Image (tube, rainbow, N blue to C red):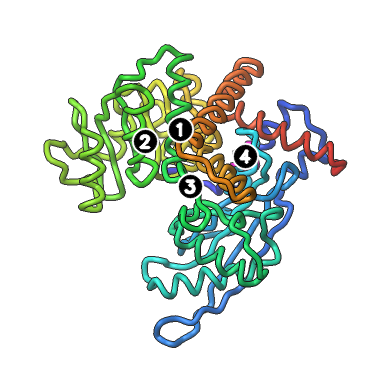
């Protein structure tokens, strides 16, 4: 698997979109760098009585279209370039689905698996003490990411409200519903992706009830397995994988039974009647739809030529390398890029902010309907750009997002 600096890849994507849009030099320079970066040290009291120092980051990449929006991840291998790239992609993601937000991201270098619940709460609160002046419903709204969750957001929201001495539930999204979270958030990322697959099947004449495979069976992968049947009226799931291995069943899995097995055992491995296969084999199966929902750079120049799926729906961040994009496009594989396919999560986070603002909450059906409308419109706008500019879908999505952000920068008089 090739190794890439994610931020270099992200910047190259911007430069390609800027060239197609004929953006001037000043606008291009503004868009290839974060507008604000913060890094800081945090001191946290551990259960053994000792104090441990952690490195933290918050990057507000661009806020021309609205407050910065993006998750906070707790991970031992976190780097500033990873966070820059993710903040950058969040900027285009919010623009592609046309919600009034910018892009941001945060992180802490830590090993959450080795920390107790109390230590994680202490770290969460210390992070907010460090960034409290930088965030807020009109500045920057964090959310969960890798190894953070709704409980993390509840701790962070509480700490922020303690500091500012007022009720501000909208400062964090993807919270528990009891403290201002919204219905429909848990499956929003997968639901948005499956909605775009539905639209792609209609446009391309692909059988929505055909075979599909899922690489990565975490939250997004599990929910995609269930929603594919619900939103597309059928489909045969023939292969899935997680960090422990991959399994194959040519006559199809019962998605509900497979999800229950994963939740019960912690892995897809050992499912009755399934054959074990290699991870690369799953990606190269003859399916109608492939959902990469796990690793970065999973589809590279070494295996892109072997991809047989008609549609690749990227629920993971950056699962396809730049070289692989060109190969897939040349081979007629329709890629729904991550900044579109996985935008359901931030879209429903925006809905959560709106509901928190008015203290008036929608039912799940309303959330699903409004998400469907947003993602359907976004998919067709990107597809129109594919035809207009004669580019592959990822570059088309970047062109849509970059154009909207560039226009906002110009209207503000920044460039």
Indicate which disc, 2 or 3, sits on the residue closer to the N terminus. 3
Nearer to us: label 3 or label 4: 4
Q: Residues within 10 Å of mark 2 (few under 14, many from 20)?
A: many
Q: What residue is shown with label 4?
A: 94
Secondary structure, mark 4, is helix
Which quadrant: the N terminus? Answer: top left
Check whether the beta carbons of the residues at disc 2 and disc 1 lie within 8 A of each other.
yes
Please name the residue that numbered disc 3 is placed on.
3
Name the residue beneath numbered marker 1.
Answer: 193
Marks 4 and 2: in contact by CB < 8 Å? no
Badge 2 or badge 4: first in the primary sequence: 4
Q: Which class describes the residues within 10 Å of circle 3: few (<14), some (14-19), or many (20+)?
A: few
Which residue is identified by label 2? 224
Q: Is 44 left, or right, of 293 in this rendering?
A: right
When the figure is inspected, residue 388 is found, relative to residue 271, above or below; the finding is above
Which of disc 4 and disc 1 is earlier in sequence?
4
What percent of the width, then of the height, locates residue 75?
46, 61
**Label 1 to label 4, Cα distance in Å?**
15 Å
> Magenta span covers which residues?
9-13
Q: Residue at x 67, y 58 (%)?
A: 136
Q: Specify the farthest residue to the bottom.
A: 49
């Amino acid at each position: 698997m090739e190794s890439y600096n994610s931020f270099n890849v992200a910047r190259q994507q911007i430069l390609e979109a800027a060239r197609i849009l004929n953006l001037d030099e000043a606008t291009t320079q503004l868009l290839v760098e974060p507008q604000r970066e913060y890094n800081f040290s945090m001191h946290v009291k551990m259960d053994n009585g000792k104090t441990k120092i952690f490195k933290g980051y918050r990057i507000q990449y661009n806020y021309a279209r609205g407050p910065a929006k993006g998750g906070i991840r707790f991970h031992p291998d976190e780097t500033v370039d990873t966070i820059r790239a993710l903040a950058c992609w969040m900027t285009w993601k919010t623009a592609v689905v046309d919600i009034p937000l910018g892009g941001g991201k945060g992180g802490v270098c830590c090993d959450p698996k080795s920390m107790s619940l109390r230590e994680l709460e202490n770290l969460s609160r210390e992070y907010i003490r460090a960034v409290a002046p930088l965030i807020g419903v009109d500045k920057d709204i964090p959310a969960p990411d890798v190894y953070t969750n709704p409980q993390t957001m509840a701790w962070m929201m509480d700490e922020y409200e303690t500091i500012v001495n007022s009720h501000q539930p909208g400062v964090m999204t993807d919270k528990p519903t009891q403290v201002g979270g919204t219905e429909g958030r848990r499956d929003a990322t997968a639901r948005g992706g499956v909605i775009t697959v539905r639209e792609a099947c209609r446009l391309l004449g692909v059988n929505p009830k055909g075979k599909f495979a899922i690489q990565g069976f975490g939250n997004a992968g599990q929910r995609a397995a269930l929603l594919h049947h619900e939103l597309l009226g059928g489909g045969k799931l023939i292969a899935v994988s997680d960090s422990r291995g991959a399994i194959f069943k040519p006559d199809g899995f019962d998605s509900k039974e497979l999800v229950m097995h994963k939740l019960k055992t912690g892995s897809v491995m050992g499912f009755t009647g399934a054959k074990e296969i290699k991870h690369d084999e799953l990606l190269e199966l003859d399916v109608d739809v492939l959902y990469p929902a796990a690793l970065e750079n999973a589809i590279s120049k070494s295996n892109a030529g072997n991809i047989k799926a008609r549609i690749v729906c990227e629920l993971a961040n950056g699962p396809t390398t730049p070289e692989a994009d060109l190969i897939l496009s040349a081979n007629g594989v329709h890629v729904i890029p991550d900044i579109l396919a996985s935008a359901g999560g931030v879209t429903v986070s925006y809905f959560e902010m709106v509901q928190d603002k008015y203290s008036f909450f929608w039912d799940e059906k309303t959330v699903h309907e409004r998400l469907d409308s947003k993602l359907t419109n976004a998919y067709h706008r990107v597809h129109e750009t594919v035809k207009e500019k004669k580019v592959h879908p990822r570059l088309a999505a970047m062109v849509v997002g970059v154009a909207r952000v560039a226009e906002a920068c110009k209207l503000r008089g920044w460039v």
